[in-house]
Image (cartoon, grey):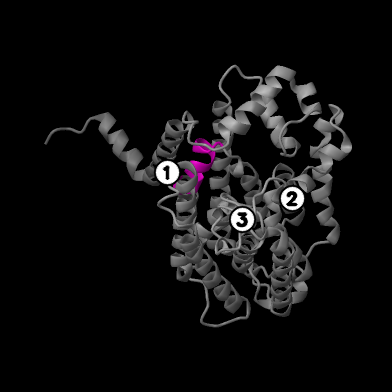
């Protein structure tokens, strides 16, 4: 028999010991290759040529200090600083923007791994879940093809949730404050923090603690981290002369876009307002906000009454559902606003809650349809009312499921991967 070469023996030994890790690295390489292919395409994005490139050019023409002192666009300061820094590089803006968003996608994948490792204790399952999120269509399309920045605030949201599940509440609020300072859309995860304050935290069953008196709760003062970080994040523009009002009221101005830019009740997001209600924003906007408020009152009351049923897994499920409720019920939602919801819902359904697999798949398919409509000009093929019906049906199924779970239905236990 021919003697095995040393190099072959080395490779086989490497594969035997580290096959899983090698596969994960290969998947990351594939995800990177996809981004490299998408990144240079700038004509499909409805925003790059109209907004992002002109913004970077504005900072190139005016310099960072003068540019931030007369900040263009309606983003808050951290993203304006990002565009200003992009202007310093002698390359097209899509290059640094694509790199930053991909780095944040990788950070999100690491956070997904951390979150589900905390919940399942299964290292390989959790690591695969994190890496697999890099191949979700909305993740691949959002940053590298659309040149959007949803991955940036989302990565901070996920870090916040990781610390929340570890009951490191101060760290959770600090990271949430960072996310909120990056993008107003982070507000959709605020309800779960309020609910956890009212329920005095949640049970940590991994420590075999079921006495509600032993909960690891937190002070209401922790919420002050959110405005504190928001104020600190605004300092670059204030110091550059942009003015306190124009800087710190940025998010208030963004909420006025519903009227000023004619978005209607919804901007191509597949929620219930696509069912003939889009043009009635002046009549329905306040009602939609109050409906959302009422829904959160009901779920908060339910969680308080049934707080002994809240554990780490249910809290993550609750975070997903409350954020999803916001994008389904609130007016003015854009195509991409469920990015963070689907990023958590997908591995959650696969690893922990197989009974919601089909709503998860439907929501992802609806998201793909919306991206196809926006990026690939498939408007003639995509019927938004039909897509919205399926999307809302998936949301309602999950709503019924989580209500049963919180109420302690013995037939609603978590499945394992």
Question: Residue sitting at 64 percent across and 62 percent down?
Answer: 319
Q: Earlier in the sequence, mark 2 or mark 3?
A: 2
Question: In the displayed structure, would residue 174 be above or below residue 205?
Answer: above
Q: Earlier in the sequence, mark 1 or mark 2?
A: 1
Predominant secondary structure, magenta span: helix
Question: In the displayed structure, would residue 403 be above or below residue 43?
Answer: below
Q: How many marks?
A: 3
Q: Give the position of the N terminus as an image quadrant.
A: top left
Question: Depth-wise, is mark 1 or mark 2 nearer the camera?
Answer: 2
Q: Which numbered circle lies on residue 266?
A: 3
Q: Position of residue 288 (x, y in %)?
A: 69, 65
Q: Gap between marks 1 and 3, in whole Å? A: 38 Å
User: Badge 2, how many Cα within 10 Å: few under 14, some, many 20+?
Assistant: few
Question: Residue sitting at 47 percent across and 48 percent down?
Answer: 373
* Residue topped by disc 2: 255
Is residue 146 shown in magenta?
yes
Q: Give the position of the C terminus as an image quadrant.
A: bottom left
Q: Gap between marks 1 and 2, in whole Å? A: 41 Å
Q: Is residue 253 visible?
A: yes
Question: Residue sitting at 42 percent across and 36 percent down?
Answer: 34
Q: Position of residue 366 (x, y in %)?
A: 47, 57
Q: Which residues are magenta?
A: 135-147
Nearer to the camera, 68 or 127: 68
Q: Which numbered circle lies on residue 291?
A: none
> From this viewpoint, which residue is outermost toward the bottom?
410
* Residue topped by disc 1: 24
């Amino acid at each position: 028999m021919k003697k095995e070469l040393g190099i072959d023996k080395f490779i086989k030994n490497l594969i035997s010991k580290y096959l899983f890790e090698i596969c994960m690295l290969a998947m990351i390489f594939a995800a990177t290759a996809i981004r490299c292919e998408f990144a240079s395409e700038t004509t499909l994005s409805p925003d790059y040529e109209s907004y992002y490139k002109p913004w970077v050019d504005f900072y190139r023409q005016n310099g960072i200090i003068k540019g931030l002192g007369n900040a263009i666009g309606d983003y808050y300061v951290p993203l304006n600083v990002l565009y200003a820094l992009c202007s310093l590089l002698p390359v097209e803006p899509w290059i640094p923007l694509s790199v930053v968003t991909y780095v944040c996608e990788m950070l999100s994948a690491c956070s997904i791994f951390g979150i589900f490792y905390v919940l399942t204790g299964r290292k390989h399952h959790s690591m695969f879940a994190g890496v697999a999120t890099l191949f979700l269509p909305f993740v691949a399309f959002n940053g590298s093809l659309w040149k959007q920045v949803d991955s940036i605030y989302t990565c901070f949201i996920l870090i916040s949730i990781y610390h929340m599940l570890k009951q490191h509440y101060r760290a959770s609020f600090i990271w949430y404050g960072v996310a909120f300072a990056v993008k107003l859309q982070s507000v959709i995860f605020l309800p779960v923090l309020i609910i956890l304050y009212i329920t005095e935290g949640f049970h940590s069953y991994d420590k075999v603690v079921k006495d509600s008196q032993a909960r690891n709760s937190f002070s209401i003062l922790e919420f002050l981290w959110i405005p504190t970080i928001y104020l600190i994040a605004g300092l670059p523009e204030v110091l550059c002369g942009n003015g306190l009002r124009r800087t710190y009221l940025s998010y208030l101005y963004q909420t006025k876009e519903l009227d000023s830019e004619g978005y209607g009740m919804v901007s191509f997001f597949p929620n219930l307002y696509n069912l003939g209600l889009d043009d009635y924003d002046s009549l329905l906007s306040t009602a939609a906000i109050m409906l959302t408020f009422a829904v959160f009152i009901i779920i908060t009351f339910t969680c308080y009454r049934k707080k002994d049923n809240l554990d780490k897994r249910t809290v993550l499920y609750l975070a997903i559902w409350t954020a999803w409720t916001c994008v389904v019920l609130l007016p003015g939602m854009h195509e991409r606003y469920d990015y963070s919801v689907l990023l958590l819902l997908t591995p959650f359904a696969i690893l922990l809650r197989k009974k919601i697999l089909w709503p998860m798949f439907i929501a992802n398919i609806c998201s793909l349809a919306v991206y196809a409509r926006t990026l690939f000009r498939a408007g003639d093929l995509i019927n938004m009312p039909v897509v919205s019906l399926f999307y809302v049906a998936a949301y309602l199924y999950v709503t019924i499921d989580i209500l049963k779970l919180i109420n302690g239905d013995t037939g609603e236990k978590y499945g394992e991967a």
